[in-house]
Amino acid sequence: MVAGKWVILNNCHLSIEFMSEMEDFLNPKDKVIHENFRIFITCLPTDEFPLSLLQMAIKVTTEPPKGLKAGLSRTFSTIVNQDFLEKVEPPEKWRSLVLSLCFMHSIVQERRKFGPLGFCIAYEFNNEDMYASLLYIDRHLNQCQQTNTQLSWKAIRYMVTEVQYGGRITDSLDRELFNDYGNRWINENCLTQNYCFDHTVTEFNYHIPDYLEHQRFVEYISKMPGNDAPPIFGLHANADLTFRLKESLEMINVLMDTQPKEASGGGGLSREDQVKEKIEKELLPKLPQDFMILDVLERLKVLKGPKGLVDAITGKYDTVPLNVFLR
C-alpha cells in the first residue's frame, strides 16, 4: 500500500472472517495510500461476504457465454485452433470428433438454463471436462493408428459420458440423459459426410461440415442462430417459454432489490434490519408474559373436574380427559 504494488487474494470465500477486517485495512487512519496500489479478490458467490467491502469494489464475474453459438465460438477461439485440428491422425476423423464433442459440451452447458427441466441437479460442467475428453480421444486415435485397430466407440462413450462428465453426475436420470447424448453424437455415424446432429430441428442445419481450415469452422459457427430451439436439446418448445419467464422474473426481482430505498422506509437499513426492528418495536411488546412451567404444573395437580369423573381407585381427577389434555 505504501510502495504502490498490486496484490491478489485468491479463494477468499474460505476466509470470510478476514474479509470482514479488510475494510479497516483499506481505510487506515493517518496513513497515505499510494495511488497505484490495487488489490484483487477472487471469491465464489457467498451470502456471507461483507456487503461494505462488496460496495467498495468493482465487481467482475466469469460465466459461460449464453447460447450454443456463443459456447462453440468460445471453444474455437480458446482451445481449438488450426494446429489442434491437425495434430492427430487421421485428421478427418479427429476433426469430426472434436466438433461433435464440442457441440455436446455446449449443449449440456446450455441445458442447465432450463433448471429442473434440463437437469434434475445443476452440475458445474466446465472446459476441463471437455479438454480431458478430447485428450482421451487423442490418445485413443493415436493408439489405434499405431496398432492398426478399429476405434472402440463403446470405450470412447464410456470415458466421456461415464468418467469425465459422468464423474460429476449423481442423479440416475441425469446419467441416463447424458448417456443418450453420447449414443447419439459419439458414434461411427459422426464420421460420415455432413453428419446432422438432429434432423427434427428446422431452424438451422446443425451438422459437421467437411472443412480443413479452422477459419471455415469459425465462419460456420457464426452462421448459427442466436436463439437456440429447445428441440436441439431434446426438449419441448414450451421449455423455452418457461425459461424466458423465469429469466424475466429474476431480472425484475434484481431491479427491485437494487432500487434505492426511501428515507422514510427504514433509514437506509437493509431488509433484514428492517424486519428485526419491526419485531423488536411492534411485535414483541404485544406478546404476553412467559408462563412459568413449574407454576402451571402445580395448578394442574390441584385442578378439579366435573362431578362424577373422579377416578374410582385413586379418588383424584388425574384421569379427567380435559386435565390430561391440559397437562
Image: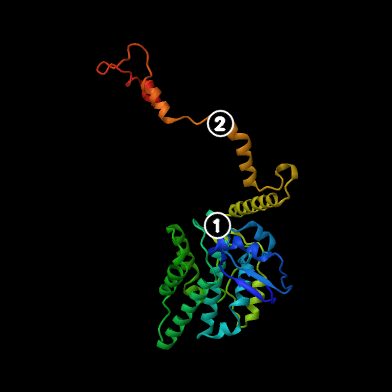
Question: Image point 66% across, 58% down: which residue?
Answer: 52
Most extreme residue toward the top is: 307
Residue 283 place in picture, x, y as percent: 60, 34
Q: Which residue is mark 1?
A: 235
Which residue is the site of mark 2? Answer: 287
Give amino acid for label 2.
Leu
Going by the picture, which residue comes out furthest to the front?
Answer: 30
Q: Nearer the viewer, residue 5 or 126?
A: 5
Quadrant in which residue 282 is drawn: top right
Secondary structure state at the residue bearing disc 2: loop
In this view, 10 is above or below 114 = below
**The N terminus appears in which quarter of the rendering?**
bottom right
Alpha-carbon neighbours of circle 1 within 10 Å: few (<14), some, or many (≥20)? some
In this rendering, the count of numbered labels is: 2
Q: Of label 2 and label 1, which has the lower sequence position?
A: 1
Q: Where residue 300 appears, x then y in whole percent?
A: 39, 23
Q: Quadrant of the C terminus?
A: top left
Q: Position of residue 175 (x, y in %)?
A: 44, 62
Front in this rendered view, residue 126 or 234: 126
Q: Decide: is 191 above or below 247.
A: below
Is residue 55 among what the camera can see?
yes
Secondary structure at badge 1 equals: loop
Residue 111 visible in the snapshot:
no
Between residue 71 and residue 145, name the one nearer to us: 71
Q: Is residue 125 above or below residue 145?
A: above
What residue lies at 44% left-to-right and 67% top-to-bottom?
Answer: 167
Q: Residue, x 62% and y 62% (percent of image)? A: 228
Badge nearest the viewer, 2 or 1: 2
| Residue type beneath disc 1 | Leu
**Image position, residue 309 (x, y; %):** 33, 14
- The residue carrying pointer 2 sits among few (fewer than 14), some (14 to 19) or many (20 or more) residues within 10 Å by Cα, namely few
Left or right of residue 257, residue 45 in this image: left
